[in-house]
Amino acid sequence: MKLRQRFSKADLVGVHFALNVFISTTLLWIILNLYARLNPIWAISSMIAASHPDVKQAVKTFWGRITNAAVGCAVGLLFLVIGGSSDWKLPIALAVTVLLSTYVVRMQGSWWLQAPITAAIIIIAADLERDSRLTDIQLGLRRVGEVMLGCVMGLAISWLMSKLWPLHESKKEAVAVK
């Protein structure tokens, strides 16, 4: 189907989602980059993962992402505290995170992948800007805060857009199937 035909059928789900992402990215950029002088990339990537044109799906995505990000955060911070400067810290922490997320948290879908990603963000970010153990933990917590802010922003803008520009039921079903 040609691009023009897709737009002529009023299937604007992609435009709806693009607008969600545009608004959320802009807000995160203003909040983190302009006001806090932080790089907003972690928050923006989390926002995209937690956004969805259908707010019900966005809520499911949000809870899966938040839960597994919390698991990844806990494991990542634990390994920062007890792991020292070992080169094996990252692979062991990621393996532990996957096991916890898979066998303890057990959320449906692919959200169990989020836990090791968050653990890696915390450990790698801390290793890249190493000054002291306290700095590692502070940096890890800041990264987690950025990830959580991105998740909240993705859900909030998805909800707001669902009120300002609601999708019709047939479009919601089509989006949920994809």
Image (tube, rainbow, N blue to C red):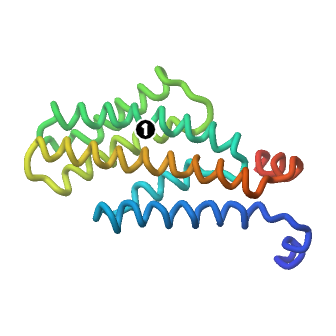
Which residue sits furthest top? Answer: 104
Query: What is the secondary structure assignment of the residue under circle 1?
Result: helix
Quadrant for residue 119, please give it: top left
Task: Name above or below for residue 27 compared with residue 115.
Answer: below
Q: How many marks?
A: 1
Quadrant for residue 13, please give it: bottom right
Q: Residue at x 37, y 36 (%)?
A: 72
Task: Name above or below for residue 170 compared with residue 114.
Answer: below
Q: Is residue 12 left or right of residue 101?
A: right
Q: Residue at x 50, y 45 (%)?
A: 152
Quadrant holding the N terminus: bottom right
Neighbor class of circle 1 (other Cα within 10 Å; few <14, some 14-19, many 20+) is many
Viewer-closest of 15 and 103: 15
Which residue sits furthest left? Answer: 132
Image coords of residue 81 (percent x, y): 16, 33
Q: Is residue 155 left or right of residue 132?
A: right
Task: Name above or below for residue 99 compared with residue 110.
Answer: above
Image coords of residue 52 (percent x, y): 66, 51
Q: Would you name the residue on which mark 1 appears?
A: 69
Image coords of residue 171 (percent x, y): 84, 53
Image coords of residue 66 (percent x, y): 48, 37
Q: Residue at x 89, y 49 (%)?
A: 170
Viewer-closest of 145 and 113: 145
Kindly identify the amino acid type of the residue bearing the numbered disc 1.
Ala
Q: Is residue 120 left or right of residue 148?
A: left
